[in-house]
Structures are given as C-alpha cells and as structure tokens.
Image (cartoon, grey):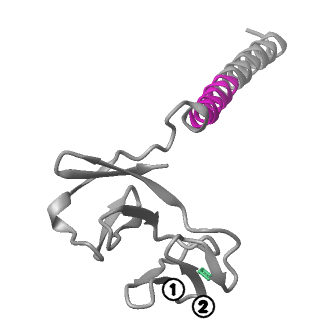
Amino acid sequence: MTEEPKQKADEKVANEVQSSRRAVLKGMLNVTGALSLGGILYGAYQFLSPGAGAVASVEIPLESIRNGGSTVFQFGTSPGILLRREDGSFKAFSLVCTHLACTVQWNPEKKTFFCPCHDGFFDEEGKVISGPPPGPLEALKVEVKGNQVLVGAG
Ligand code: FES
C-alpha cells in the first residue's frame, strides 16, 4: 500500500470514530434531556394532581383531651395543635407561623399563640394580634367520629 491510500484510509477510520463518538454523545444528551423533562413533568403532575401534598387526617382519642385542654400532634411535616374549649368544642391549627415559619407556642392562660422568632401574637382563633405575621394561623378541619377526633387539612 502506498502512502497516499493509507493516509486516506486512516482519515476514513478517524472520521468514522469521530462520527461514532458524536452519535454516543448525542444519545447521552438525548437521554439526559428526556430524564430532565420526565422529572419536570413528574414534579408538575405531583403539584397539580388532586390531593397533591395532602396529609392524612390525624386521629386523637376524644378522652385524651379534657375541656380547656390542648394536645400537640405532628401533621405531615409540621406541628399542629388541637384545642378543646371549655364548652367541649374543638379547634385545630397548624403551629407554623405565617411570617417565616417558626413554630408558635400556645399559652393556655392568656389564650394566645406566641411566635418567639419576631414576637408575633395570635388570638385563640389564630388571628394576628400583633407582630409581623401577615396572616392567621392555618386552621385545620376537626371532626368528631365516635370516640376519635379527626384533624385534617381544612
Ligand atoms: S416567624 Fe413568627 S413572627 Fe416571624
């Protein structure tokens, strides 16, 4: 084989290898793009689907909370509180402050919620009394079924 045909053969092989590398790289980019798109679409589905982010109801035994008492529970990833009024009625709230999401504390003597982060105060209905919170505490739905109190998203 003379030098010129050998050089052309080498160039042809080099072009084929380069073309093959491009195909592999293009395939990898397509797979990465498809995975990214899949992740975005799955996230959008999770966000938009009915019941997205829904937290199952919490069951609290009726006899575990006396009139005028309260009990704290975990509601999904956040703390919540169930209050039983003197008349036996119930109210439940998320204990997540609506300002910057600190945990508020219930003061049964003053019947107020206090947020220690920036001195936010809420009344027993969860409404803002003073401080920087922009809105009331999230009220949770309460339902008494038999000897259980079910607390869920309102
Ligand atoms: S986080 Fe509650 S007052 Fe700022």
Sequence-wise, which precedes: disc 1 or disc 2? Answer: 1
Q: Magenta stretch: residue 41 in it?
A: yes
Whether 33 is drawn above or below 139: the answer is above
Across and down, in percent, residue 38 comes to: 59, 29
Three-letter amino acid code at the position of disc 1: Phe
Residue at 63% in and 26% down: 34
Residue 18 image-quadrant placement: top right
Q: Are marks 1 and 2 in contact (CB under 8 Å)?
A: yes
Q: Is residue 154 left or right of residue 147?
A: right
Residue at 76% in and 19% down: 15
Mark 1 to mark 2 CA distance (whole Å): 7 Å
Q: Is residue 53 left or right of residue 100?
A: left
Secondary structure, mark 2, is loop
Residue at mark 2: C-beta within 8 A of ligand 1: yes
Read off the residue under disc 1.
114
Residue range of the region highlighted in magenta in the rendering: 26-44
Give me the disc on residue 119.
2
Secondary structure, mark 1, is strand
Quarter of the rendered structure image containing ligand 1: bottom right
Q: Is residue 132 left or right of residue 88?
A: right
Three-letter amino acid code at the position of disc 2: Asp
Residue at 63% in and 34% down: 44
Magenta part mainly helix, strand or loop? helix
Residue 83 image-quadrant placement: bottom left
Q: Magenta stretch: residue 102 in it?
A: no
